[in-house]
């Protein structure tokens, strides 16, 4: 990441209205690197969940098709898989 | 429930929002609540999960979620962070922000910390994501600071807001609103 990222920091020991109570602070290089690692991990977890949901949907569709081939009605097949 | 602080993200966005920098969250309440209205700069999906961290600790977090998309069957999953709801993203129609609430009971206790969160983000009839989570932190120190951040996007967009509230238990054991 090359863009400058900042974080909002609230020091609750300062009184309300104090200009130092809420500040915008640039991230350090270490924080930027950690943010990138966090993003990569979150994307990987998201992709894994998407793949799992896709596999479930495909298995469900396959199951319904097989039930229909066995002679069940659409409503009966849906009742079994839902 | 008493408002402690509200912050609004300015121009350029913010990678995270920290309440209680330097360990300054008052220890005078019973529970904490964070209300969030947020949009992240993620572009490849209509929602972004928001994670919370306590006292600068980056490990020892897990959550279980139930997620619905407005159609089909809701799904459930687990993850390794402390969830604070969801945000809308730059994948959504302009001006769409997600809403979320994180409730943290007994934040001053010397026990492990739990939290419940719910979030909703709609995208002008294209999708409507609902997110409900139960999170756990294995750290036992009283919570003196909380950092919330989008997990996939690099920042909360301008006009995102987060508000920290304190909830106080009544003397009879009930909850009072102040």
Image (tube, coloured by chain):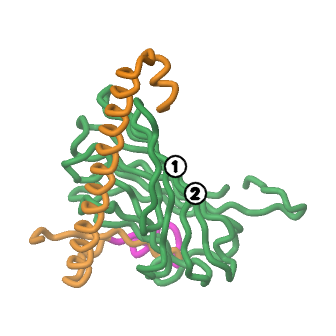
Chain colours: A orange, B green
Write the residue at 53% across / 73% down. A15
Magenta residues, start to end: A13-23
| Type of secondary structure dominating the magenta stretch | loop
What residue is pinned by disc 1?
Answer: B132
* Residue B49 magenta-highlighted: no
Q: Position of residue A81 (x, y in %)?
A: 47, 32
In this rendering, position of residue A9 left or right of residue A28:
right
Residue B131 appears in the picture as rendered = yes
Write the residue at 52% across / 74% down. A12
Mark number, residue B116: 2
* Residue A20 magenta-highlighted: yes
Q: Is residue A40 above or below residue A28?
A: above
Q: Is residue B78 above or below residue B61?
A: above
- Tell me which label, 2 or 1, sits earlier in the chain: 2
Q: Is residue B76 above or below residue A26?
A: above
Q: Are marks 2 and 1 on the same chain?
A: yes
Write the residue at 21% across / 79% down. A33
Decide which of B66, B99 is in the foreground and name it: B66
- Mark 2 vs 1: CB contact within 8 A: yes
Mark number, residue B106: none
- Secondary structure at badge 1 equals strand
Label 2: how many Cα within 10 Å (few below 14, some 14–19, many 20+)? many
Decide which of B30, B127 is in the foreground and name it: B127
Q: Position of residue B43 (x, y in %)?
A: 19, 49
- Secondary structure at badge 2 equals strand
Q: Chain of mark 1?
A: B
């Amino acid at each position: 990441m090359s863009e400058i990222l900042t974080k909002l920091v609230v020091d609750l020991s300062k009184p309300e209205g104090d200009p130092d109570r809420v500040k915008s602070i640039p991230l350090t290089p270490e924080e930027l690197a950690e943010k990138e690692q966090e993003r990569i991990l979150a994307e990987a977890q998201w992709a894994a969940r998407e793949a799992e949901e896709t596999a479930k949907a495909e298995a469900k569709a396959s199951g319904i098709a097989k039930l229909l081939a066995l002679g069940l009605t659409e409503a009966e097949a849906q009742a079994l898989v839902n | 429930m008493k408002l402690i602080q509200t912050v609004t993200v300015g121009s350029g966005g913010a990678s995270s929002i920290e309440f209680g920098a330097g360990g300054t969250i008052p220890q005078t309440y019973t529970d904490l609540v964070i209300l969030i209205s947020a949009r992240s700069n993620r572009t490849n999906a209509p929602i972004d999960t928001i994670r919370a961290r306590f006292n600068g600790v980056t490990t020892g977090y897990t959550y279980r979620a139930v997620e619905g998309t407005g159609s089909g069957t809701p799904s459930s999953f687990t993850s390794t962070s402390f969830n604070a709801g969801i945000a809308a993203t730059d994948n959504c129609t302009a001006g769409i922000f997600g809403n979320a609430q994180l409730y943290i009971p007994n934040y001053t206790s010397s026990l492990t910390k739990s939290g419940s969160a719910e979030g909703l983000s709609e995208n002008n009839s294209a999708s409507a994501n609902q997110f409900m989570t139960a999170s756990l932190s294995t750290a036992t120190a009283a919570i003196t600071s909380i950092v919330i951040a989008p997990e996939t996007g690099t920042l909360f967009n301008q006009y995102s807001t987060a508000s920290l509230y304190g909830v106080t238990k009544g003397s009879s054991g009930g909850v009072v609103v102040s």
